[in-house]
Amino acid sequence: MPRISVELEQFSYPDGTVALADIHLQVARGDFVGILGSNGSGKTTLLRIMDGLIKGYRGKVLLDGEDVTRLHPRDIYRKVGLVFQNPDDQLFASSVFEDTAFGPRNMGCAEPEVRGRVEEALASVDMAEYAGKGIQQLSYGQKKRVCIAGLLAMGHEILLLDEPTAGLDPMGEYRMMELLTRLNRDQGVTVVMATHSVDLVPIFLHRLHILSRGRLVRGGTPEEVFTAPEELENVKLRLPHIAELIYRLKHEEGVPFSRIPLTIGAARREIVEAMGR
């Protein structure tokens, strides 16, 4: 049974604009899934529907086989947590410890358990040494890590992340993706992230779905999804830079590459092999 199953016929905004339609998506336990789309494609709305924050749609969204519209919010939030794009919209306590502790306390945990949960969650996101720091003393990337810690402290097994690398410098982007990979691989956290960062996707994600104008137009592994720049251009996206280079060399310069690699390591092997032919 998938952890999350989305069979969405349609969701419209109050003014009648159709935001999402014909969405069929399943997320299995332990998946690391990306929803890739340009700004305005409906990524945030889809995450909020999966998290139970938005209702009033036609269709069905299941969490472990149960309709999220019939679940008490507490039952949803014990399993699923949404990390907003802007951490300042999510953090509100004075210190890192207090913000991370809010969820477990609200769940009724005794104070010793709260402390244990907070310490474990902060350690998971490499923020243990910042427990006593004020929120406003943190960098943007550190704030994003604290948001994730707050959800982990509540025992969330599924993280939904809205543009987790937005606003970070290149090294910050890579560290954030390494963190999510570690949580997914070592702790079994199921991760679904909305993003438009095509260069990071092939390195880290298991599966990828392209969302365009409120519809999923393609899904599969990154290798299956990233095929030709013309097709991605139609949905206002592009190939990863390394794949774009190899594609152009193959189709415009006649270099005999056997495939279009998506990472630097794979491109290096293709180049070495082509040079030996």
Image (cartoon, rainbow, N blue to C red):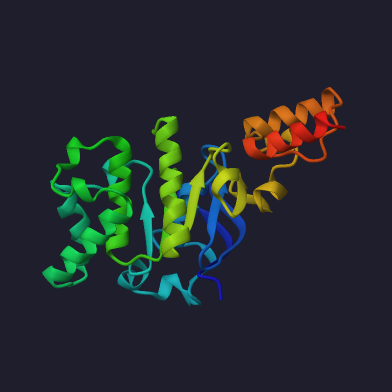
Image quarter where the N terminus lies is bottom right
Image quarter where the C terminus lies is top right
Give the vertical position of 244 relative to 213 (above or below): above
Across and down, in percent, residue 154 comes to: 28, 65
**Residue at image coords 32%, 51%:** 125
Q: In the figure, is residue 123 to the left or right of 84?
A: left
Q: In the figure, is residue 223 to the left or right of 11?
A: right
Q: In the figure, is residue 89 to the left or right of 162?
A: left
Across and down, in percent, residue 136 comes to: 18, 37
Location of residue 116 (image quadrant): bottom left
Across and down, in percent, residue 149 comes to: 29, 55
Q: Residue furthest front?
A: 276
Residue 244 visible within the image: yes
Across and down, in percent, residue 9 comes to: 60, 62
**Residue at image coords 84%, 22%:** 253
Give the vertical position of 177 relative to 136 (above or below): below
Q: Residue furthest top?
A: 253
Q: In this orientation, which residue lies closer to the viewer: 263 or 236?
A: 263
Residue 51 visible within the image: no
**Residue at image coords 18%, 72%:** 109
